[in-house]
Image (cartoon, coloured by chain):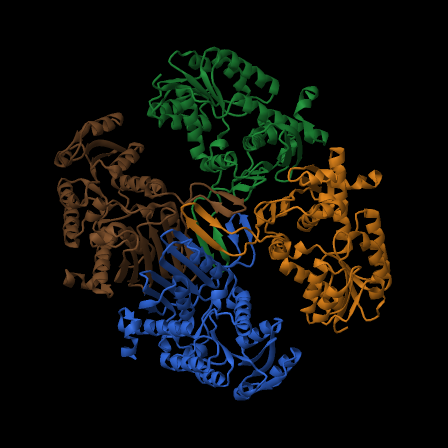
Chain colours: A green, B orange, C brown, D blue
Amino acid sequence: MGKVRVGIIGAGRIGRIHADNLLRMGEAEVVAISDLFAGEELLAWAGERGIGLVTTDSAELIGRTDIDAVFICSSTDTHVPLIVQAAEAGKHIFCEKPVSMDVNRTREALEAVSKAGVKLQIGFNRRFDHNFKRLRELVEQGRAGVPHLIKITSRDPNPPSAAYIQVSGGIFMDMAIHDFDMARFMAGSEVETVFAQGAVLVDPVFAEYGDLDTAITTLTFASGAMAVIDNSRRAAYGYDQRVEVFGSKGALSADNDYPNTVVVSDEAGVSRDKPLHFFLERYNEAYIDETRQFIDSVLHGKPLPVEGFDGLQAELIARAAKESVKLGRPVKLAELNALA
Amino acid sequence: MGKVRVGIIGAGRIGRIHADNLLRMGEAEVVAISDLFAGEELLAWAGERGIGLVTTDSAELIGRTDIDAVFICSSTDTHVPLIVQAAEAGKHIFCEKPVSMDVNRTREALEAVSKAGVKLQIGFNRRFDHNFKRLRELVEQGRAGVPHLIKITSRDPNPPSAAYIQVSGGIFMDMAIHDFDMARFMAGSEVETVFAQGAVLVDPVFAEYGDLDTAITTLTFASGAMAVIDNSRRAAYGYDQRVEVFGSKGALSADNDYPNTVVVSDEAGVSRDKPLHFFLERYNEAYIDETRQFIDSVLHGKPLPVEGFDGLQAELIARAAKESVKLGRPVKLAELNALA
Amino acid sequence: MGKVRVGIIGAGRIGRIHADNLLRMGEAEVVAISDLFAGEELLAWAGERGIGLVTTDSAELIGRTDIDAVFICSSTDTHVPLIVQAAEAGKHIFCEKPVSMDVNRTREALEAVSKAGVKLQIGFNRRFDHNFKRLRELVEQGRAGVPHLIKITSRDPNPPSAAYIQVSGGIFMDMAIHDFDMARFMAGSEVETVFAQGAVLVDPVFAEYGDLDTAITTLTFASGAMAVIDNSRRAAYGYDQRVEVFGSKGALSADNDYPNTVVVSDEAGVSRDKPLHFFLERYNEAYIDETRQFIDSVLHGKPLPVEGFDGLQAELIARAAKESVKLGRPVKLAELNALA
Amino acid sequence: MGKVRVGIIGAGRIGRIHADNLLRMGEAEVVAISDLFAGEELLAWAGERGIGLVTTDSAELIGRTDIDAVFICSSTDTHVPLIVQAAEAGKHIFCEKPVSMDVNRTREALEAVSKAGVKLQIGFNRRFDHNFKRLRELVEQGRAGVPHLIKITSRDPNPPSAAYIQVSGGIFMDMAIHDFDMARFMAGSEVETVFAQGAVLVDPVFAEYGDLDTAITTLTFASGAMAVIDNSRRAAYGYDQRVEVFGSKGALSADNDYPNTVVVSDEAGVSRDKPLHFFLERYNEAYIDETRQFIDSVLHGKPLPVEGFDGLQAELIARAAKESVKLGRPVKLAELNALA
């Protein structure tokens, strides 16, 4: 295989970002794009990029013999059936998080992938962020010693729309799931218990849909380490994404990125511009890097950087967090089946 | 009253620090110092400072008519009886934290103080730290808006001795109690529930005494805000004391203090010296400031900056944290009596 | 004109960077590339990118009617004749700095450009750096008030090769010329006098070629402001490019960029990785931006962000700096002709 | 000698600061204070501190046999005669900078000191600043390698009064003299040439008295290193005192001190309070430290940290800077005599 021939399923913002990133790589080709609402605009967009096939039918795309891998960027409820179909068709799969909102269905998808022997990478893009990647390298080099405490701050600049909130799966499955993956990534150990507390402090609309906008989740790991994650749907100063790993030899911390380094000192004080506004700005390079590593893995047989199992674990933690809020007590991952 | 005439009870490190700080103030006079083990060394120390009375008997000191206020710096188990005696003798009282390890006994002390109409300030010195004081001012000015999340990092450079651990009251009552007070100070609201998790990751000696060396505690406040505190008995890089208040209008954060601002850039990277080593370095000015405000309050009738009630609340939270670890679930402050 | 059709003259590192940046822009097309030493390797390189013409003859490229603009990226001695030819052929021109090492020849080139009515942009890429661009915006908004002092630090991570030093034109014309342009950019005023001091402290090879490796240059502006630039050919910690503008209302300063924000706190101290290594890393985005603005200017008639006049002024200052070192006294730009 | 018995000459702000600092040291005693305008207020001030003698006559103070050392804190024009008298009386001397505004008179004072065999320390307090002291330690440890470039930023928050400007000796002798000493302190080498440029940009009152308010001075050292100092009489954001030493192995830089570490992140950006306002705040500890070292030197025979020779060298540089502005060319220290 000289190039990986890719089909994109779902032509929303993230689907197009992946397409554009793939188009810049010598080792990938974008052959087709499907979207339920494909129309003139998408045809034009695809035409400018030399993408030959535009269709409303994802099955057509999956059925193509000139496609080696699919990027599943459609709505969450379509992920499991698409993964199953793609796996059965022998396609390698890149799927956005979460695989599904039901861990049993996610397990089904993973089984289909395993049976078909194809690759499945989950879109936990933050592992590829230059700061968090470097932090993880240093953890692996033992610069923090044995990890004791992992602290993750994860706050969005603005809440999503009411329409989105309604179908989002809630703050844990939609937003904190990235942080749950980050905690596992840094800890190098599996989560045992989850305790989550939440509140509606940003906007009452979250309460209307039984959701939360502010949360603190604590995790304990098999290794004995603990993690704490704080989430907010609205940080007035923009996207706030920081990680700290504290261990027996010291602490490693990754701060936000800023658009520039300019500092103003005047009578009012010392100031600088706000951090990069949101995920498209902050994780721009990370999206490219995750795609490159997926292509690399498909083409050269390198191990995947984030697998289906990682998707499942993060979902389990999100599920446990939701349960923990409901029950008002810590929940063990091991007891989740009984609860379900 | 031209000057406040002070007697110091307990001539350990902290008693002597308070004495020296008082000696520098125009409005205070140190008249006497008592210590169970007072001997030649203490006589010499007091002599150099012109402190007239050195005794092994705290009752003698409390009985003096030329003393207006006492600083109780002896071991925790002596605090309640000394507060009661001093209150009954009409002395104003500055007492180190915690008042006691039993909230009911603390209540007794507070009642005696209330009955006698004297002042009681608790030694929560961190409220007077230049960073945290400034942070609190900004919270009061509304710079963070309505507080949503309070994050406190509190790590010591090195664990105390085994002998100390044994009588310390445990990580929550001995160490985190400062952070519980800080959380209340920043939240401007009272704690409702406490959930604490802990581990022995630093030194097995903590387990021997049924104690922990690493902990994460989450608090919920009546206002709806939440707080999270992480504690460790050993940070390889020194004393780590940071606070962040996140709210509807933004985030306020206070970093550590450093001994200097020098940055070295060389082939190995960019580096600077570690933060100030421990509480004596970090809170040097804070100790002076808390003492000054106590003297000010006694002399000029200004309100106390930290009262007996604040001591009681922090103890209640510490007690709840310990209970929470034991029970493996969140504990409400309201249910503490039932548990006791 | 739907797209600007570009020919690249000189297929060295910088020529290829410009080509690749142009290839990513919807509004530009790279039609041809010429290089004295064009061979198999360049043919393959151009083939991958769909660049139709590869030639050893720049005149052939300039003569093409399907080319609207040329990028002159060949050696400095070829700049003036190529500018003159391209201008006479009616091509718009982007030329790397310096135009030449002889201000009279540079003036010739500018006259040819002026006569032909084509556009000439000089490759002062640092004006497009996200930090310096933001700093300049703030200067324009008056955030520093009236500029009084401009301070520029400009140090390379490693000296160039002896071969390069020999033909470089010296530290002022080769390296500091960027800083002279930056000083003018920030001051918004023209330079009147130049005083430069230098030394050979990094490597004696500089002395062999009558060059310096360390220099401090001070400039005075017509506005009354002053600037100081310090240059070194070797900073052990990497590329050091900082600018500060101090004025009646305060100071604005732009720091270096770093590869990540990770901070390590351990027993040795607090450290982070070195700044971005060299100009390709630091000014990656700036190269794209300068090219985009050139294309924009050609296509939509917008004003050029850096003109031939800016190239000439920076060369005059570099010339004066060299003269100043020789004479051991400040040199006025106005007296340069007399000296020449 | 158990304690150094000190007399203070000049009861202005700095004289009183030294007195209070001495009063806190176990090894010093303040016996007397003299001031031309000594009156009720000074008597009261001295009374509170137990200073026995208050006089308008400095000769009376110098004549006392119960005085071991004098602190000369009176106006600059009195320094030389007082040093000579004190030296002849066998007193050790701490003298504020500058010794005088005429290097020949300063030499006279130094000769008297040398002849009498007493100690003379000059009040270059900035050498004792925690940041600059640490920077110097690192230079001595070779962390920067061989120093190539020294950069000093030195800006005051506000200009002095017109009355002060008139008698100040000008920006170089009054203000930059501290920076000239700092440059020598960091370089560990002697200055050979001085080139200074200045302007009146802050307030026309400076021009009225033939003075400048903004200046850039470059120095070359015998070692081959160079230094650049920028001065301004008015920085809108407060006192700006930074030093950078760049050498063969890297760069060491000392930033300003801030009143706290609190950072505010909100919709407007990320900000913090201004640096410490002026020298009393910034150099508070440095004043204590310089006094302590003087007392230590007198009592225990340790070498002085700043000697008369250091005072003379800084004055020579200031003189050369003034000359350089007048002549519009670099001035060698060696040619100063010819100019005088």
Image x and y of residue A227, in percent: 61, 35
| Residue nearest the observer in this picture, D318 or B135 | D318
What residue is shown at x 48% (from left), y 30% (from top)? A125
Q: Is residue A194 visible?
A: yes
In this rendering, is residue B80 above or below C280? Answer: below
Image x and y of residue A70, in percent: 44, 19
Image x and y of residue B96, in percent: 74, 56
* In this rendering, position of residue C256 left or right of residue B224: left
* In this rendering, position of residue B89 left or right of residue B42: right
| Image quarter of residue A163 | top right
Q: How many marks?
A: 0
In this rendering, is residue D250 above or below D209? Answer: above
What residue is shown at x 14% (from left), y 54% (from top)? C104
Q: Is residue A231 visible?
A: no
| Image quarter of residue D18 | bottom right
| Image quarter of residue A215 | top right
Q: Quadrant of the C terminus of chain D?
A: bottom left
| Residue nearest the observer in this picture, B274 or B209 | B209
| Residue nearest the observer in this picture, C272 or A80 | C272
Image x and y of residue D257, in percent: 51, 59
